Amino acid sequence: PYVSGKEEELPLVKENENVDVKEVNMYDKETQPPKHYTPASIIKELAKRNLGTKATRAQIVDTLFQRGYVTGKAIEATDLGISAVETLEKYCPKILDEELTRHFEIEMDEIEQGKKKPELVLEEAKQSLKEILADFKKKEKDIGAGLKEATIETQNKANLIGKCPVCRKGNLRIIFSKKTKKRFIACDNYPKCRTTFSLPQKGLVKSTEKAC
C-alpha cells in the first residue's frame, strides 16, 4: 500500500506519561540497494569528487571497459576489476589513494590560476610516484599472482557463449587455434560432441545470453 506523508508537530510529553494510542501501523519493507552507475552518471561522480578533467573523465571510463574491469550499461565490476582493487589495496594501497589524485588535480588548477609554480608541483609528483613505484616493484610478484587467477576466470567467462544446442551437455566456447591462429566456436564436450561454428576474425564477440 502507498501512503502520503505530511509534517505534523508532536505535542510535548513527559517521561512515563500515559498517552492514548489511536492507530498503529507496521510496514514490511526491504532496504533498496543503490542504483548502478551508468557511464554518464559515473562521469558526473568523478567531476563531483574533483577527479580527472573534462577532457580525461570519459577516457578514464572507456579504459575501465576496454580493460575488462567493468561491464554493462548499468555498470558492474567484473571479477578482474574486483580482484585488481582487492590486490592493490592489499599490496600497494597508495595507487588507489583518491585523496592523492585529488590533491594533484587541485595543484594543476592552481598552476593554471598562477597560484603554484609548475616545477614545484612536478617535483612533488615525481617524488610521490617514485615512492609508489618502489613499493609496487617490491611486491610485483604477489600482485601478479593475485591478478592471474582473476584474469583467467574473466577470460573464461568472456569466452562462454552458452549451452550446446546439439549435445545439450557441453557449452559452446570461443576457441583460439594455435595451429591456424584463428578463432571459432566449439563445444567443450569434445570429442563426444564435434559441434563448431566459424567466427569473423575481427571485432568483439559477446553472448546475448538468449538463444536464437
Image: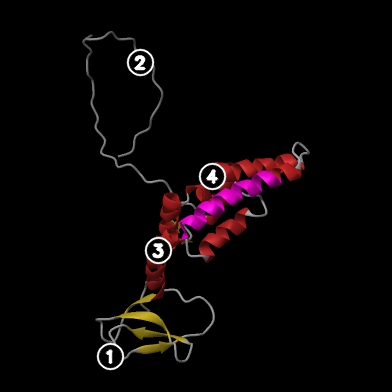
Q: Which of marks 4 and 2 is in front?
A: 4
Q: Which of marks 3 and 1 is in front?
A: 3
Q: Is mark 3 on a helix, strand or loop?
A: helix
Split into 4 quadrants, where in the image is the N terminus? Answer: top left
**Circle 2 is placed at which residue position?**
10
**How far separated are the C-alphas under marks 1 and 2?**
76 Å
**How far separated are the C-alphas under marks 3 and 1?**
33 Å
Which three-letter amino acid code belongs to the residue tagged 4?
Answer: Glu
Residue 160 visible in the displayed image: yes
Horizontal and vertical percent position of residue 75: 46, 57
Which three-letter amino acid code belongs to the residue tagged 2?
Answer: Leu
Q: How crowded is mark 4: few (under 14 residues within 10 Å), some or many (20 or more)?
A: few
The structure residue drawn at horizontal position 45% and vertical position 91%, both measured from the top left corner, is 179
Among numbered discs 3 and 2, the one appearing first in the sequence? 2
The structure residue drawn at horizontal position 37% and vertical position 89%, both measured from the top left corner, is 196
The structure residue drawn at horizontal position 51% and vertical position 49%, both measured from the top left corner, is 96
Q: What element carries label 2?
A: loop
Q: Is mark 1 on a helix, strand or loop?
A: loop
Pick the residue in front: 51 or 123: 123
Which three-letter amino acid code belongs to the residue tagged 1?
Answer: Pro
In this view, 149 is above or below 45: below
**Circle 1 is placed at which residue position?**
191
* Label number found at residue 145: 3
Please provide the residue range marked out in magenta.
122-140
* Label number found at residue 98: 4
Among numbered discs 1 and 4, the one appearing first in the sequence? 4
Q: Are marks 4 and 3 in contact (CB under 8 Å)?
A: no
18 displayed left or right of 142: left
Q: Residues within 10 Å of mark 2 (few under 14, many from 20)?
A: few
Among numbered discs 3 and 1, the one appearing first in the sequence? 3
Q: Nearer the viewer, mark 1 or mark 4?
A: 4
